[in-house]
Amino acid sequence: MKYEIPPDEKAVNKVMARNSQVLAKKYNMRPFGVSVAMPEGDIQFLELEFQICGPLSKEQVRKILIEAAHGFLADINADSNLCTYLKNHSLTIKDIGITLFLIDSSGRGLRDPNISIAKIIKGELEYDILADVYDDELKRNIPQFKSKSRETYEEALNKLSS
């Protein structure tokens, strides 16, 4: 028996692949993953995840997140085929996500004092700093959250324009 990919999944796959490639090239990032929420067939949330070489300042990360989210959202809402499967025939900034995993030139995740993970998700930006904590039992460093800071999408836009 042959599995046929439903048209809504084909539309999502096409948009996700296209945006992964465009954003990866534009910001010199590596596509890392995707998240899709499609309960009962209605597309309600789309997220792209990337690895990006750092360290980067909070200002640099904010600019990438906002610009990438704007490009992603504009492309989603301009795709008439995809829009037929969207919950409200379009998405807003609260219905998408972009996550950046910051790495060094060797491919290792960045740690304190640098931003380790940054994301825009559901209309809020979050910047996470990880610290390595040595686990005697495991005899290795385990990353743990040291700090998180958040700002609303509107606050981030204001900081970008000032």
Image (cartoon, grey):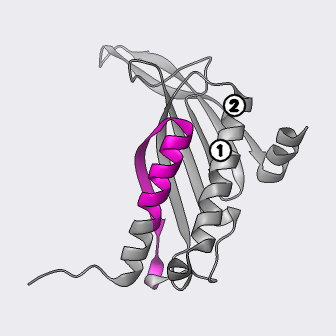
**Which callout, 1 or 2, points at the residue further toward the start of the chain?**
2
Residue drawn at x 42%, y 45% as measured from the top left: 31
Provide residue 154's location: percent of width, then percent of height: 83, 52
- State the extent of the magenta-drawn residues as a range: 15-40
Q: Could you tell me which secondary element the residue under label 2 belongs to? A: helix
Q: Amino acid at mark 1?
A: Leu
Provide residue 89's location: percent of width, then percent of height: 62, 83
Residue drawn at x 69%, y 62% as measured from the top left: 93
Provide residue 121's location: percent of width, then percent of height: 63, 54
Front residue of this view, candidates 91 and 14: 14
User: Mark 1: few, some, or many residues within 10 Å (few <14, many ≥20)?
Assistant: many
Q: Is residue 121 visible?
A: no
Magenta stretch: includes residue 53? no
Front residue of this view, candidates 15 and 50: 15
The residue indicated by pointer 2 is: 60
The residue indicated by pointer 1 is: 65
* Quadrant of image for the C terminus: top right
Picture disc at residue 21: none
Marks 1/2 in contact by CB < 8 Å: the verdict is: no
Provide residue 81's location: percent of width, then percent of height: 50, 81
